[in-house]
Image (spheres, rainbow, N blue to C red):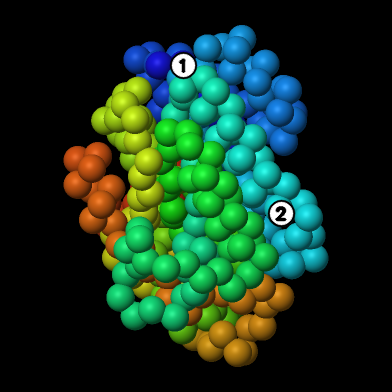
Amino acid sequence: MNILVTGCNGQLGTELQKIASAKHQWFFTDVDTLDICNKEAVEQCFVANQIDACINCAAYTAVDKAEDEPELATLINSFAPKVLADTCLRHNALLLHISTDYVFGGDANTPYKVDDPINPQSVYGSTKADGERLIRESGCNYMIVRTAWLYSSVGKNFVKTMLMLGDTKEEINVVADQKGCPTWAHDLAVALVALLNKNGKNEVHETFHFTNEGQITWHDFATAIMEIGGKTCKVNPITTDQYPTKAKRPAYSVLDLSKIKEYAGIEIPEWRESLVRCIEELKRKEIV
């Protein structure tokens, strides 16, 4: 297949570049080479490269900033996915779109299944939910994959921030009453390729969830990062009320992974196992 990847310089796009096999022809683009809000530019890209599938890794992910920039968040998270979906429909191509746990209300106490009702609590969550809806309404072949707490050895993320603080602080405070599960971008990239290979060019209209296995709090995550990274910084548990943010965070956003495991026939690593591998990669890069 000829596969277009948007947002290729982000965490997930970078991992896809690492594992892209010669089985497919890959076209990696970012905002400087393809404006996915530009219908004509996207159409020209599909025609010129005979695109069979598009993995949309592009997103506005600054959760708090989105509260002040709803128009820009809407453009990237809602309008651009519609442009890609409409183009995929015209070319009988598959759209593999990345969404988020933030589409849910965060008030559950058991893992969210893919068909549970959504109830976004922030501008970011609402724009991602609208993006999902517009893709479904377009009539194109799609796989929407919701993920959460994404991190990798590139870009800005919680793991790299904690490791940096571990070098500069004796102690830090981290929220201990928000529960979810981290996702190593490498594992998500592997799962996306598995979905593509499983489905091929067949008709599909499906939503999946993918994170690493397990459920922890941000405090648990930060403590593990310090331990695995060899940092002596103490991590103190605090409540959400003690760490106010502009956008509301979900108190519980654990995602049920059973559907993607059955559909793609994959085993998903436990969160700590993948965290160890990522920190080892950072050490090899001499970032830690």
CA neighbours of label 2 inside 10 A, class few (<14), some (14 to 19), many (20+): many
Indicate the quadrant where residue 69 lies: bottom right
Residue 264: give x, y in percent of width and height. Answer: 24, 39
Question: Which residue corresponds to mark 2?
Answer: 73
79 displayed left or right of 102? right
Nearer-N-terminus badge (1/2) = 1
Residue 109: give x, y in percent of width and height. Answer: 34, 80
Question: Can I make out residue 231 in this image?
Answer: no
Task: Report how far apart the C-alphas of labels 1 and 2 lie in the structure.
Answer: 29 Å
Regarding mark 2 in the picture, which secondary structure is present there? helix
> Mark 1 near mark 2, Cβ–Cβ under 8 Å?
no
Q: In the figure, 127 relative to 222: above or below?
A: above
201 displayed left or right of 237? left
Regarding mark 1 in the picture, which secondary structure is present there? strand
Residue 233: give x, y in percent of width and height. Answer: 52, 74
Q: Which of the two residues, 61 or 281, is positioned nearer the viewer here?
A: 61
Q: Which of the two residues, 184 or 65, is positioned nearer the viewer here?
A: 65
Name the residue at 59% across, 18% down. Answer: 46
Indicate the quadrant where residue 213 lies: bottom left
| Amino acid carrying mark 1 in the image | Asn
122 displayed left or right of 103? right
Q: In the figure, 8 relative to 242: above or below?
A: above
Q: In the figure, 115 relative to 23: above or below?
A: below
Question: Which residue corresponds to mark 1?
Answer: 2
Which quadrant is home to the N terminus? top left
Name the residue at 63% across, 57% down. Answer: 127
Name the residue at 64% across, 49% down. Answer: 77
Question: Can I make out residue 112 in this image?
Answer: yes
Residue 184: give x, y in percent of width and height. Answer: 42, 50
